[in-house]
Amino acid sequence: MARSQQSFNKREKEKKRRKKNQEKFERRMQRKQDKAESGPKSLEEMFSYVDENGNLTDTPPDPAKKKKIKAEDIVLGIPPKEEREEDLVHQGTVKFFNHDKGYGFITDAETQESIFVHINNASYPLEERDKVTFEVEMGPKGPSAVNVVLVEG
């Protein structure tokens, strides 16, 4: 007597494949039915409008609330930097300075921000807790103190 060519494992895999295909077909038919029940939307229902505050709404905007904007008032790119003479020179305290490596950090008196300082940007040798005035420039790794001058007193 000849044995069947299909093993139990093959029959189980075939059952799972048929069941998966049947579930996929049922989901597709359910989506078609849901789409048919909701009906096609009219063109007006598909429109969205932006109100004066920039929010999406389904009602058209009121022309009375429309704001007039001059083309000259629109700034493209980076806005021009304001000149601030009083903000150029900062005061602070040397928080840390390593004489062997020639760098340290100054704490800004106003912002309490820690700013890098190199010995080449200082007019005198710096010590910790020295009061100094300095200007800030953006270095390759962040703000850096330049024109560092020791304050007497």
Image (spheres, grey):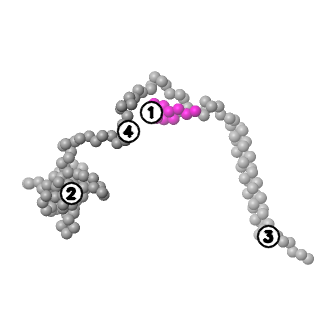
Work out how far the residue at label 1 is from the one at label 2, CA to CA, in angstroms. Answer: 44 Å
Q: Tell whether position 83 is magenta.
A: no
Residue at the image point whose x is 33% and y is 40% from the top: 79
Which of the labelled discs sits on residue 53, or is there none? Answer: 1
Question: Secondary structure beneath disc 1?
Answer: loop
- Compare marks 1 and 2 and give the one earlier in the sequence: 1
Front disc: 3 or 1: 1
Question: Secondary structure beneath disc 2?
Answer: strand
- Compare marks 4 and 1 and give the one earlier in the sequence: 1
Front disc: 4 or 1: 4
Residue type, label 2: Ile
Residue at the image point whose x is 78% and y is 63% from the top: 14
Which of the labelled discs sits on residue 86, or is there none? Answer: none
Work out how far the residue at label 2 is from the one at label 3, CA to CA, in angstroms. Answer: 79 Å
Is residue 92 visible to the viewer in this orientation of the structure?
no
Q: Which residues, given as a range, are shown in magenta?
A: 47-56
Q: Which residue is mark 2?
A: 106
Residue type, label 1: Asn
Q: Nearer the viewer, residue 113 or 145?
A: 145
Badge 3 local density, few (<14 within 10 Å), some, or many (20+)?
few
Q: Which residue is mark 3?
A: 8
Q: Which residue is mark 4?
A: 76
Expressed as whole percent of the image width and height from the top left, the position of residue 112 reads 24, 52
Majority secondary structure of the magenta segment? Answer: loop
